[in-house]
Amino acid sequence: MKGYTGVLLDGQAIHYVDKKRWFWMLSVIVPLQPFIPIALHAKTGVEAWFVIPFLLNYAIVPLLDWALGADINNPPEEVVMQLDRDSYYRRLTYIAVPLHYIGLVGSIWYATTQPLSWWAFTLLALFAGLVSGFAINTGHELGHKNSKLEKQLARLVLAVPAYGHFSIEHNRGHHKYVATVEDCASSRMGESIYKFAMREIPGGFVRAWAVEKERLENRGMPAWNVRNQILQSYAFTTGFSIVLLLIFGWTVLPFLLIHNIFAYWQLTSANYIEHYGLLRKISDNGIVERCQPHHSWNSNHIFSNLLLFHLQRHSDHHAHPLRRYQSLRHFENLPQLPSGYFGMYLLAYFPWLWFKVMDKRLIALPHVDGDLDNLNIDPAAHPSILLKWGARRDV
């Protein structure tokens, strides 16, 4: 297996091998998941197979996270530059882009050409949307990089779930305002995921357009311009959808509607759990604290990280947005999620259970130290949170 050699400050040589090197291919083949229930249904005619993928993602993956445990291994800083320059890791993200198109087209082909019941059709559309949530994750990894190719690929893959504004909003909006009350993509303590979605989804569209409009106007161009990166991605989405409609007929429309909404929901689920209740401090002169690793919830659960291009090492990602997925680090004493993202999504869908599990973890964080002033709290929930936690320090 390929290794990387560096030199420590004391002159000693250090050799590092990424033991997960070949396992990162799991993130690449994720887009092909819909072909599992399709193949099983084609062989047996049993529509219940379309339920299986949801069990795999929301039950089996969390169980594997629990069984395999956490990975706290970090690449030494002395070899990170070599690791980042290894083209193998970049190529995996490149390959994932066309596979997302193959997965979606294959799902639409089967749903529109086979005599499926309405509920099997809906389940397949929902699962295709779940998988396209991974497309947003691939676009997230690519969109943070400075190369023109990777930014173009990000826009291309984000066209699959019709979320072309994501890179603009995420890079120049969310990363700027993360863990502040101004950020529509940072959830607040006491805010359910359903309430959060009502401000996160539209807020992301509005902020992305405002940011891109400002960028173009600073260059002397109107917002409605061929150079508008949001419009470029949505134009491709529109063209792609029209082609699908012409090939497969009008039933493509409800499929894409269900698919797109559920893909959006996957991003909302991730955004909800990643910064829940965390708050950056504001100095007396109004300067917002620089984003630190403790302003994100982290997860080192190995299996789900291998499916998500290491997205769950979110603390290091926000502290160093340009760092590539294979080089993201674990830090001690950070906000840690009790499960990987898939398990936490399921928990978040039951707000009373989410609050029961996560609020005590939030209050007990070292940098919070039981002080509600150190938390981003939903104003509507503030009175009840103050009543429950305001005078408590023994958490």
Image (cartoon, grey):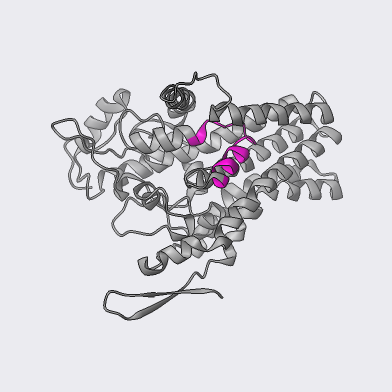
- Residue 268 in view: no
Q: Nearer the viewer, residue 218 or 34?
A: 218
Q: Position of residue 241 (x, y in %)?
A: 72, 29
**Image quadrant assignment for residue 264:** top right
- Image: magenta residue range: 149-167
Taken as a whole, is the magenta stretch helix, strand or loop? Answer: helix
Q: Residue at x 44, y 62 (%)?
A: 70
Q: Position of residue 385 (x, y in %)?
A: 27, 31
Q: Residue at x 47, y 64 (%)?
A: 83
Q: Per the image, is 195 magenta?
A: no
Q: Residue at x 38, y 38 (%)?
A: 175
Q: Nearer the viewer, residue 155 or 271?
A: 155
Q: In the rendered view of the protein, which quadrant contains the N terminus?
A: bottom right
Q: Position of residue 133 (x, y in %)?
A: 58, 40
Residue with the most extreme front position: 220
Q: Name above or below for residue 112 compared with residue 98.
A: above
Q: Name above or below for residue 2 compared with residue 106.
A: below
- Residue 116 in view: yes
Total labels: the figure holds 0
